[in-house]
Image: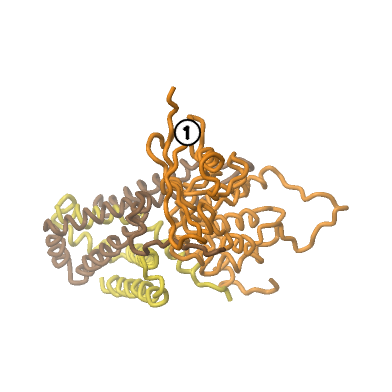
Chain colours: A brown, B yellow, C orange
């Protein structure tokens, strides 16, 4: 007789069963911290509409330990997003000449180089002038 | 007419993911850590930021940064909610998530126009 | 001289005598060059002939012997006892599929999905034999070769949490095989496959966990195939919206 047995899977906790799934979920959850940062950053920039003093006062409020910890956590999340994102690019971007394929390390590496270059430019624009 | 509009949301997620990966870390470092702790502060820092952000090119840059990253984040959050047991509420979750990104984008426009 | 042995905890399910599965513990000889399949064959031949499981080539090309070994999807012909010895080995049917009996899963869902993606060369006009073969350069072969290595073993479906949560997801191997044909220079079937691939349960449900590519025994990289399919799907979508479609 046939009576196929269906094994169940917990919809809420399946990702805790394997380390690789936990890392996946952490990667996805970086989006929550990054979104929260955007809200704070937008409010920070909005102060400029009230003038430079309002902006500076807001920035001084962000020096409290709670806010610094928040931004450190966001930084960790943002770095984890960036690193996992760039490391996945070789699976998506395939560059070929004839039978030869550009090695993964160049695909991912070029993104890291671009990341560094862009970050340097932004620091220069904000601080260096 | 294409069957599923998923391609559109995925495109925003994908563009936003690249933008966020390249730009968010340095902005977090600058505006969330370096500026409050005084690493980059000068006496005229507020005026400096005012002048910088008032420039139209800066506003376009910030609009792209905020808007695309918002759409990236909500797309991921939407799928996390699906993959942690809320798949039966697919449509309302999608509406709330992308709606939030639209609100974020509109708020960004208002803020940037006010500066 | 005492020979060493290894313990296997094997999933049993016999619908005619039980409603819930059980685990049965067996002891098999330990040999350094044995794989889990060898131990299962020993059990079936010498200890318990009632144990049911699929296997065939025992060399990693047929895709028949996929099972969960200590919770990981593996081809049992490629899982060496020495990598687990002396700890006991837990053998279960491939995850995310209904169990027919013991280690045998029901693969109807995958077979339907495979058929849905039409994994064969589709031509607008078949070339008559008199006109000769379809010519393909090594470079053209290189574009799809990796995706052609799929042996339909379904380890990727067992690894995919999205498929586990929602079996309507078309799944890694089906999409990789659709890509294999879409990229084949001899094929003209992209439009024919588009509807299945670009539907909501097609590529868009994938959240790039990438575990499918990790467990694939043939390095097909189905996760890569899916992301590439998303890119071409997105380009198609923008084209269809921004450019009027004349004759399709």
Q: Point out residue C61 in the picture as x, y percentages from the top left corner.
A: 61, 43
Viewer-side residue, C108 vs C245: C108
Task: Measuring from the top left, give residue B5's x and y in whole percent.
Answer: 50, 72
Chain to which mark 1 belongs: C
Give A75 or C25, whichever is nearer the viewer.
C25
C168 relative to C191 in the view: left or right: left
The image position of residue C72, as x and y in percent, is 44, 47
Asked whether A110 or B54 is in front, the reply is A110
Q: Is residue B14 visible?
A: no
Name the residue at 31% across, 51% down.
A79
Q: Identify the residue at horizontal 21%, vertical 59% (top origin).
A: B48
Q: Height in image: A36 above or below C35? A: below
Q: Is residue A129 left or right of residue C26?
A: left
Position of the N terminus of chain B by quadrant: bottom right
Assign a secondary structure to mark 1.
strand
Report x, y in % for residue C236. 58, 66
Characterize the local packing of mark 1: few (<14), some (14-19) or many (20 or more) Cα atoms within 10 angstroms: some
Q: How many numbered marks, from 0 up? A: 1
For disc 1, the marked residue is C29
């Amino acid at each position: 007789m046939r009576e196929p047995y269906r094994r169940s899977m917990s919809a809420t906790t399946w990702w805790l069963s394997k380390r690789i799934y936990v890392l996946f979920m952490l990667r996805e959850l970086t989006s929550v911290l990054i979104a929260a940062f955007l809200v704070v950053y937008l409010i920070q920039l909005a102060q400029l509409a009230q003038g430079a003093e309002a902006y500076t006062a807001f920035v001084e409020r962000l020096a409290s330990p709670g806010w610094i910890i928040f931004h450190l956590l966001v930084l960790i999340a943002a770095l984890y997003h960036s690193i996992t994102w760039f490391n996945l690019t070789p699976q998506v971007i395939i560059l070929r000449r004839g039978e030869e394929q550009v090695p993964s390390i160049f695909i991912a590496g070029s993104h890291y180089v671009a990341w560094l270059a862009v970050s340097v430019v932004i620091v220069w624009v904000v601080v260096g002038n | 007419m294409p069957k599923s509009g998923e391609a559109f949301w995925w495109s925003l997620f994908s563009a936003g993911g690249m933008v966020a990966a390249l730009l968010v870390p340095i902005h977090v470092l600058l505006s969330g850590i370096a500026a409050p702790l005084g690493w980059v502060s000068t006496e005229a820092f507020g005026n400096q930021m005012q002048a910088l952000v008032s420039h139209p090119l800066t506003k376009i840059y910030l609009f792209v940064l905020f808007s695309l990253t918002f759409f990236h984040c909500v797309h991921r959050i939407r799928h996390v909610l699906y993959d942690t047991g809320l798949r039966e509420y697919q449509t309302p979750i999608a509406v709330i998530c992308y709606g939030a990104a639209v609100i974020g984008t509109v708020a960004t426009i208002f803020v940037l126009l006010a500066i | 001289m005492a020979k060493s042995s290894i313990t296997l905890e094997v999933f049993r399910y016999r619908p005619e005598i039980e409603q819930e599965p059980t685990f049965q513990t067996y002891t098999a000889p330990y040999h350094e060059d044995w794989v889990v399949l060898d131990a299962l064959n020993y059990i079936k031949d010498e200890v318990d002939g009632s144990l049911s499981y699929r296997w065939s080539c025992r060399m990693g090309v047929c895709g028949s012997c996929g099972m969960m070994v200590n919770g990981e999807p593996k081809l049992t012909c490629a899982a060496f006892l020495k990598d687990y010895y002396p700890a006991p080995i837990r053998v279960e049917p491939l995850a995310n599929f209904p169990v027919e009996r013991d280690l045998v899963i029901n693969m109807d869902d995958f077979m339907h999905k495979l058929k849905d993606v039409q994994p064969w060369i589709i031509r607008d006009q078949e070339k008559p034999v008199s006109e000769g073969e379809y010519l393909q350069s090594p470079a053209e072969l290189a574009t799809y070769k990796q995706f052609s290595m799929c042996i339909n073993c379904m380890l990727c479906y067992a690894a995919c949490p999205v498929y586990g949560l929602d079996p309507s997801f078309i799944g890694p191997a089906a999409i990789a095989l659709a890509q294999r044909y879409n990229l084949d220079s001899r094929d003209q079937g992209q439009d024919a496959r588009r509807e299945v691939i670009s539907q909501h349960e097609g590529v868009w449900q994938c959240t790039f966990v990438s575990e499918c590519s990790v467990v694939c025994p043939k390095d097909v990289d189905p996760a890569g195939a899916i992301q590439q399919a998303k890119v071409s799907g997105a380009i198609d979508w923008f084209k269809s919206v921004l450019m009027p479609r004349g004759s399709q």
